[in-house]
Amino acid sequence: MLIQISNYLFMGSLLLLIVTCIAKGALSQGFTSVTGLGGISGSATDLNMEHDQKKQFHFQDSLLGRIVKSYFFWISVLGIIISVIISKL
């Protein structure tokens, strides 16, 4: 019985973690904001070479920061940890 609860808790937490990462990461920025193709013509390779590296690093840091600050992220991580502990009992 505990193994079945542990399995459901793990799968639910994993699904919540995936949805949280997608919602906070990719969907909150949009394609043109991530690629820099908003209204500028030219190939994506040339645009990526012209980007400021500090700006790119700041964007990546803020993206990770938004995910880690989310309550749903920590709830899903806690659910995964609890499911592992239950399965060991």
Image: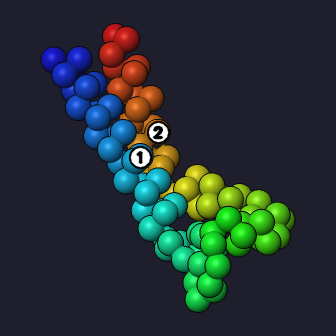
Q: What residue is pinned by disc 1?
A: 17
Is 80 positioned to the left or the right of 50 in the image?
A: left
Measured along the vertical axis of the image, is residue 85 above or below residue 10?
Answer: above
Q: Where is residue 78 in the image (x, y as percent from the top left)?
A: 45, 37
Nearest to viewer (mark 1 / mark 2): 1
Does residue 32 lie above or below 83 as drawn?
A: below
Say if mark 1 contacts mark 2, CB within 8 Å: yes
Q: For this view, does 2 lie left or right of residue 56?
A: left
Q: Which amino acid does label 2 sit on?
A: Val
Which amino acid does the dot numbered 1 rest on? Answer: Leu
Number of numbered discs on residues: 2
Residue located beneath label 2 in the image: 77
Q: Residue at x 22, y 18 (%)?
A: 2
Q: Could you tell me which secondary element the residue under label 2 belongs to?
A: helix
Assess disc 1: are there few (<14), some (14-19) or many (≥20) residues with their C-alpha within 10 Å of its C-alpha: many
| Image-quadrant location for residue 32 | bottom right
In the rendered image, residue 40, in percent from the top left (x then y), is placed at: 63, 86
Q: In which quarter of the image is residue 3?
A: top left
The mark nearer the N terminus, 1 or 2, is 1
The outermost residue toward the left is 1
Give the CA separation, mark 1 to mark 2. 7 Å
Tell me what residue is drawn at x 49 percent, y 73 percent: 30
33 vs 45, left or right, is left
Query: In this view of the protein, can residue 62 be seen by the observer?
Result: no
Q: Give the left or right position of residue 53, taking residue 27 as reference.
A: right
The answer to whether residue 35 shows anywhere in this view is yes
Q: Residue at x 68, y 59 (%)?
A: 60
Q: Position of residue 33 (x, y in %)?
A: 58, 76
Disc number placed over residue 59 in the picture, else none? none
